[in-house]
Amino acid sequence: MPDTNDRTTVTVVLPNALLTLFTGSEPRVEVAASTVGEVFDALEARWPGMRDRLRDSTPAIRRHINVFVDGRRATLDTPLAPGTEVFVLTAISGG
């Protein structure tokens, strides 16, 4: 059985839209996480309320949020390797 404390350090790149909502948030932050879901939990611990902006109640990543790991779209269960960069992007739409 894997150790639940066996997390790796990853870098998270956050969009400006989130930075303006959470005082003291930074565009790049390092967190200990082994999945994208754990990244969201770590962000929540630093900036309460951020997780709710990123995922819905099912839980799944909100449809207007895109998360990329190694150039691929990620889910909450996407595993993370040491040193991975996790990009959180807000969707852009127009008419």
Image (cartoon, grey):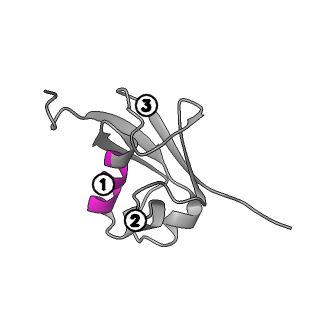
46 relative position to 5: left or right: right
Residue 74 drawn at (x, y percent): 51, 40
Count of marks placed on residues:
3
Disc number lying in front (2 or 3): 2
Circles 3 and 1, Cβ within 8 Å, touching? The answer is no
**Picture quadrant where residue 7 is located:** top left
Could you classify mark 1 by the number of other residues whose Cα lies within 10 Å: few (under 14), some (14-19), or many (20 or more)?
A: some
Residue 8 drawn at (x, y percent): 28, 32
Residue 60 drawn at (x, y percent): 45, 54
Q: Is residue 2 above or below residue 53?
A: above
Tell me, for residue 57, which label it has, or none: 2
Could you classify mark 3 by the number of other residues whose Cα lies within 10 Å: few (under 14), some (14-19), or many (20 or more)?
A: some
Residue 82 drawn at (x, y percent): 34, 27
**Picture quadrant where residue 93 is located:** bottom right
Tell me, for residue 84, which label it has, or none: 3
Q: Mark 2 vs mark 1: which is more N-terminal?
A: 1
- Per the image, label 3 sits on a secondary structure element best described as loop
Tell me, for residue 41, which label it has, or none: 1
65 relative position to 79: left or right: right
Whether the magenta-drawn stretch holds residue 44 is answered as: yes
Q: Mark 3 vs mark 1: which is more N-terminal?
A: 1
92 relative position to 25: left or right: right
